[in-house]
Amino acid sequence: MRTISRNDLRSVLADVTVVDALPAAPYRVRHLPGALNLVIEDVDGQAAQLLPDRNAEIVTYSTDSACGRGEALGERLEQLGYANLRVYRDGIEDWVGAGLPVEADESGQPVG
């Protein structure tokens, strides 16, 4: 699977669909700006509704490079016919560590 760096993701954030592969509880605490939430356990039943354009640019991520949820989700989306996927392997920990903004809970209010 193709990867994307933090700096490259920052530059295209407004133009891609970002998908947080972590469970709902950590997603509500913090996620990348505008990120959708979809876990591998629900991808088969929810991908078509949540991600209707199979040609859209999609970036998946999870906690960090040691967490495989983002990559596993991206691989499953590829199997389901999504054509333009990348994974941000360094994940939310790298994003937060760089001091970049995140959103929290369903209201999308910034944290910190």
Image (cartoon, rainbow, N blue to C red):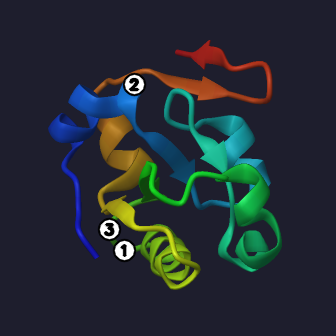
Tell me the tag on residue 65. Answer: 3
The quadrant in which the N terminus is found is bottom left
Are the residues at dot 3 and dot 1 in contact (C-beta closer than 8 Å)? yes
Nearer the observer, 49 or 14: 49
Q: Amino acid at mark 1?
A: Ala
Task: Check disc 1: other Cα within 10 Å, few if <14, some if 14-19, many if 20+.
Answer: few
User: Total of numbered circles in the picture?
Assistant: 3
Q: Kindly identify which residue carries mark 1.
A: 66
Q: Secondary structure at mark 1?
A: loop
Q: Going 78% across and 19% down the picture, which residue do you hit?
A: 107
Left or right of 58 in this view: 38: right
Q: Amino acid at mark 2?
A: Ala
Mark 2 surroundings: few (<14), some (14-19) or many (≥20) residues within 10 A:
few
Q: Say whether residue 98 is visible.
A: no
The residue at the far bottom in this view is 79
Estimate the x, y position of residue 15 in percent, counting from the top left. 37, 30
Front residue of 17/63: it is 17
Q: Is residue 25 left or right of residue 55?
A: right
Of tags 2 and 3, the one toward the viewer is 2
Residue wearing tag 2: 14
**Labels 2 and 1: the sequence-earlier one:** 2
Q: Are marks 2 and 1 in contact (CB under 8 Å)?
A: no
Secondary structure, mark 3, is: loop
Instruction: Please tell me whether mark 2 or mark 1 is closer to you in this view.
Output: 2
Q: Secondary structure at mark 2?
A: helix
Vertical side of 15 occupied by 90: above or below? below
